[in-house]
Amino acid sequence: PIGFTYATANCTQTIYHGISVDNCCTSTLLPSFVGTSTSNAGFAGPLRLLNSFTITSGTAFFNGEFMLAPNVSITVEQGAQMNVIGAHFYACTDMWNGIVVNSGGKVLMQQYNGVDNLIEDAITAVAIHSYTNSTVPVLDVSNTIFNKNYIDVDIKNYTQTTADPFRFASTIFSCRNY
């Protein structure tokens, strides 16, 4: 319990009250997105992401606070782009899977109005596997903190067809409590 003490003229009173913390993924107080695909969309948090979904085309913008259910992944398809601007992604309880960038997809992470990105609690925060497209940049990250992820950025079997496919500036990789 938490105690609140207040005083008036000649009287001091303390009131004790218990506080329970709900699992954010089961909360009915926060809005949620439960779609399976999207294109040319804007997401403004706070928002619960309860199931995996795919950005199929165009650009999807993410700004604000995003709570992800266990094992949720966001997939960026060929020709699609995910813009993370001033966002905080974290797990409700168990780790979420992360962002999967398929060949031809792009991810941009940058600050917005002075607010940096914070990407936390992912099994693999950003996965880029078997990428053969010449899209540049594939991953452009600035003013972003990757924190408490099992793997922050995983690039495998990348066929380099252009210079500078991956850019990192003012980025922190850490494992700490904020």
Image: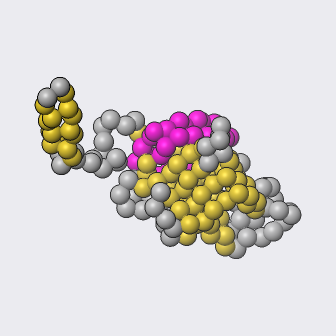
Task: Classify residue 72 by image quadrant.
Answer: bottom left
Give percent across and percent down for residue 44: 53, 36
Give percent across and percent down for residue 45: 49, 38
Residue at the limit of the structure toward the right, as seen here: 163
Tell me the residue at 15%/35% (across/down). 12
Question: In the rendered view, does 151 fall on the left or right side of 139?
Answer: left
Give percent across and percent down for residue 89: 50, 51
Give percent across and percent down for residue 82: 64, 47
- Does the magenta stretch mainly form a helix, a strand or a loop? strand
Q: Which residues are magenta?
A: 39-66
User: In the displayed structure, would residue 159 be above or below residue 73?
Assistant: below
Residue 41 visible to an observer of this rendering: yes
Which one is nearer the viewer's eye here, 155 or 80? 155
Tell me the residue at 86%/63% (across/down). 162
Tell me the residue at 19%/27% (across/down). 8
User: In the displayed structure, would residue 56 be above or below residue 160?
Assistant: above
Question: In the rendered view, does 65 fall on the left or right side of 80?
Answer: left
Which one is nearer the viewer's eye here, 173 or 122? 173
**Visual colour scheme:** secondary structure
Whether the magenta-drawn stretch holds residue 145 is answered as no
Tell me the residue at 59%/58% (across/down). 145
